[in-house]
Amino acid sequence: MDRQFTRIANVIAMAAGKPLTFIIAIVIVIVWGISGPVFHYSDTWQLVINTGTTIVTFLMVFLIQNSQNRDAAAMQAKLDEILRAIDDARDSFIGIEHLTDTEIEKRRADLEKECGQSDEDEQGKAKLKGANESLDRILDRS
């Protein structure tokens, strides 16, 4: 069931993000607006658009959240693999997305403090050198 939901959510999310879908939504709103005088701006006329937009919004919230959760999990897995693959990277950062906000902020503050201890020029050179070495190791594996 999970795989089927993911497939359906992907199809709907892709369709919802297309320009044609946006144009269709605009056309629906314009037709609804033009039909107002025909229905004398009745309560039912107003209820139609209010109910439709509420239902679509309600369902889209869940689809968007599902899509973001999958994207975030995939990104975390990719970043964890990069951390694992780079020799100088600290493995202790793998999986930190499971920590509390306070624990993550403490790690972040510690990192910023650690990086701020060296001279800015030396820090920039060290970062560039480390990045180049890491990139070289990754390219050597290819």
Image: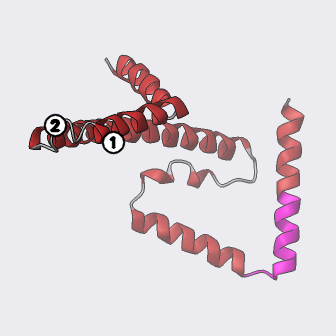
Q: Compared to 91, does 48 lie above or below?
A: above
**Amino acid under disc 2:** Phe
Left or right: where does residue 10 sit relative to residue 2? right
Please state which amino acid type lies under the numbered disc 1. Val
Q: Is residue 88 above or below residue 81?
A: below
Indicate whether 78 appears above or below 116. above
Start and end of the magenta stretch? Answer: 117-130
Q: Name the residue under label 2.
A: 39
The residue at 47%/52% (across/down) is 97
In the rendered image, the quadrant that contains the N terminus is: top left
Is 121 left or right of 86, judged from the image as shown? right
How is colour applied across the structure in the image? secondary structure
Q: Is 60 in front, or is 130? A: 60
Question: Can residue 5 be spotted in the picture?
Answer: yes
Residue 137 sits in quarter: top right
Give the quadrant of the C terminus.
top right
Q: Name the residue under label 1.
A: 61
- The quadrant in which residue 46 appears is top left
Distance of label 2 from label 1 (alpha carbons): 31 Å
Q: Does the magenta stretch include residue 142?
A: no
Q: Where is residue 45 in the image (x, y as percent from the top left)?
A: 16, 39
Q: Image check: 49 left or right of 19?
A: left
Q: Is residue 66 visible?
A: no
Q: Identify the residue at horizontal 43%, vertical 31% (top origin).
A: 24
Of circles 2 and 1, the one toward us is 2
Q: What element carries label 1?
A: helix
For the point 40% across and 35% down, the residue is 25
Residue 121 shown in magenta: yes
Q: Which circle's residue, 2 or 1, is located before the other in the chain?
A: 2
